[in-house]
Amino acid sequence: MNLQKMLEANREMLERRERRDRFVMVAYIATVIGLVLAAIAAVILGDCADPCDTRQEHPRPAHVEPAPDPVEPFFDANRQPQVAGRGADAAPEVPPSSLSGADNPSTPRPATCLLAAIRAEESSGKARPTDGDGGRAIGPYQIHRDYWFDSRLPGRYADCRSEPYARRVVLAYFRRYEPEALAAGDMEALARLHNGGPRWRERPATADYWRRVRKHLATEGRCSAKQRFAAQHELSD
């Protein structure tokens, strides 16, 4: 009788030990699985910290310091293309025969005149305008991320809040999509391009935008008297 009790007690002890061992094994396996999943999640989140950001409409180009000596086209009163480079090594983009009057500091510059009018329309000429279009347009020219990306100008999108950099972005955009209009000083085409993008000809609303910009041209101090007169004459037609 005592032997039978001892055997039953021993069997119960073995069963308890077996249950304890199973519990320990399950807990160990769960811990290992948790550590593996945590490591995988860390790798995935680390890789996607920048490229997987769905708020970006385009892949962000590598940051490169803006070029110090951009070449900016402008035009004289007879609409002859000129070249104004800030650096001594700026290469002309037009034949030397068309550079008459380039050294004259009073030479009218329709490109500068148009940019001033666009800035007046977009941000009332404010140095630090608030973001527009629900936060999707920034800086004095209210530039969208797609616009900046398409200009292919090195730098950061946030740099468009700086007027000098934003002006270079606009000119680079003009050169890419309407080089002939830029060379000819076609302000209407450039203004409508700024507002409607490369397909501005298919967007009638850009004509209204041009009419608003033209009003600024008629009073803009940076425009020559001849340019202001032409804008006022068009407004009266």
Image: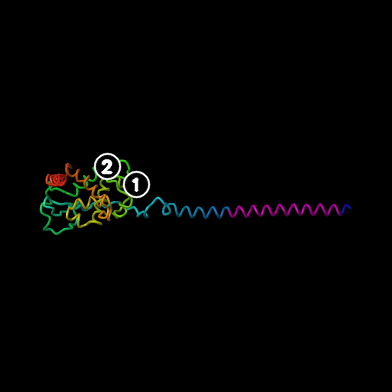
Q: Amino acid at mark 1?
A: Arg
Disc 1 and disc 2: Cα gap in Å? 14 Å
* Furthest residue toward bottom: 95
* Mark 1 residue element: loop
Seen at 84% across and 53% down, the residue is 6
How packed mark 1 is, by other alpha carbons closer than 10 Å (few <14, some 14-19, many 20 or more), is: few
Residue 229, image x and y in percent? Answer: 12, 45
How packed mark 2 is, by other alpha carbons closer than 10 Å (few <14, some 14-19, many 20 or more), is: some
125 sits to left or right of 3: left
In which quadrant of the rendered view does residue 218 lie? top left
Residue 180, image x and y in percent? Answer: 20, 57
Decide which of 224, 105 is in the foreground and name it: 224
74 sits to left or right of 128: left
Decide which of 134, 211 is in the foreground and name it: 211
Label annotation for residue 229: none
Residue 45 located within the stretch drawn in magenta: no
Residue annotated with mark 2: 123
Residue 15 located within the stretch drawn in magenta: yes
Q: Which label's residue is closer to the chain start, 1 or 2?
A: 2
* Furthest residue toward front: 237
Residue 134, image x and y in percent? Answer: 35, 44
* Mark 2 residue element: helix
Seen at 11% across and 49% down, the residue is 104
Residue 173, image x and y in percent? Answer: 26, 54
Which secondary structure class fits the magenta region best? helix
Label annotation for residue 136: 1
Seen at 43% across and 54% down, the residue is 52
Decide which of 45, 114 is in the foreground and name it: 114
In which quadrant of the rendered view does residue 93 lie? bottom left
Decide which of 101, 229 is in the foreground and name it: 229
Q: Amino acid at mark 2?
A: Ser
Magenta span: 4-33
